[in-house]
Amino acid sequence: MARAQSGRVAHEPGSGPASPAAIQICEGTVRAMEPVTALAGDTVVDVTDILQQTQVMEVLDKLDRELVGLRPIKTRIREIAALLLVERMRSTVGLTARPPALHMSFTGMPGTGKTTVAMRMATILHRLGYVRKGHLVAVTRDDLVGQYIGHTAPKTREVLKRAMGGVLFIDEAYYLYRQENERDYGQEAIEILLQVMENQRDDLVVILAGYKDRMDTFFQSNPGVHSRIAHHLDFPDYTPDELLAIAQLILSDHMYRFSDDAVIAFRAYLERRMAMPHFSNARSVRNAIDRTRLRQANRLLARGGQITRDELMTLEGQDIRVSRVFRQTEPGGAATDA
């Protein structure tokens, strides 16, 4: 799964033409800043033609392929894309096309795909003419809030300058507000952010992300922020079957695979790991795969002799069962993905 580094700009790679046969968008889509085709009088708009021009279906299909599960999230993204497409079509026939509110809140546990969806959303908005560049700038509190008087405003404005024309993704956004600390400068960053969200919403989309309960508290304490958020998407945890499917996708990308016994062992690993503290869904699965590959490498080298291509590709059950997750964990003991 794609993950944007804090404070870094993530770009969606270019892609080829979209298939007209994939017209499955739910309802609606965004206005174009510049109409794709100048139409006059009582005319019609060809949906297939618009989809080919924007190639937005390719992005949606890629999202389906990259992310296991998350059906409610994918449905909502398709609905937003549909709204934007219809607004684009309205603008081509001279109908009023007022830019819809697009600032969003993504809530859920770590590793549920929030950053990946934000990256795809940036690409969709760009292809439909709602942002100029289509890049994603992912930041946290440290990128926005200074440590002394006069430091926060320039830091926040610099981040906003880099994000203009794209999407600003603020992870763990609730850390911007620390009510218990009167000398905290996070409120200054929030005030600057609110101004930009209102006055430059045609050139920047802001996505606030974090744990749902903490984001709810953040919105209650900052009603001005909540009133500017049009779309609240809650990312569900993955099921064990979905996590296994994610593991197999990761393995396939790196030309590995599980043996039959490894599938059984990894299911057992997931049952135990999901019950431990600090479980991070797909992120924990990726960590577990990395450690399993380390154990496989050590096992093969310790054995010596000739090693077949199939052996180099296959992770065995024993590579998984030696994990500390299978040992009895003391109450309150720290959990790891090891």
Image: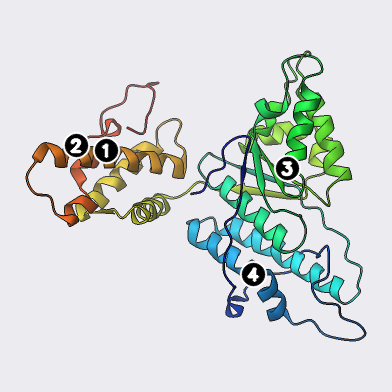
Kind of residue indicated by mark 4:
Gln
Q: Which residue is mark 3?
A: 163
Q: Quadrant of residue 287?
A: top left
State the SS at label 3.
helix
The quadrant of the rendering that contains the C terminus is: top left
Callouts 4 and 1 close, C-beta under 8 Å: no
Q: Which mark is residue 294?
A: 1
First in sequence: mark 2 or mark 3?
3
Left or right of 218 on screen, residue 2: left
First in sequence: mark 4 or mark 1?
4
First in sequence: mark 4 or mark 3?
4
- How far across and down, in percent of the image, does residue 248 sit? 35, 54
First in sequence: mark 4 or mark 2?
4
First in sequence: mark 3 or mark 1?
3
Separation of marks 2 and 1 at Cα, in angstroms: 6 Å
Q: Which residue is mark 2?
A: 298
Q: Nearer the viewer, residue 322 or 48?
A: 48
Separation of marks 4 and 2 at Cα, in angstroms: 46 Å
Q: Residue at x 9, y 41 (%)?
A: 304
Callouts 2 and 1 close, C-beta under 8 Å: yes
Kind of residue indicated by mark 1:
Leu
Kind of residue indicated by mark 3:
Ala
Q: Which residue is mark 4?
A: 55
Separation of marks 2 and 3 at Cα, in angstroms: 44 Å
- How far across and down, in percent of the image, does residue 202 sit? 83, 52
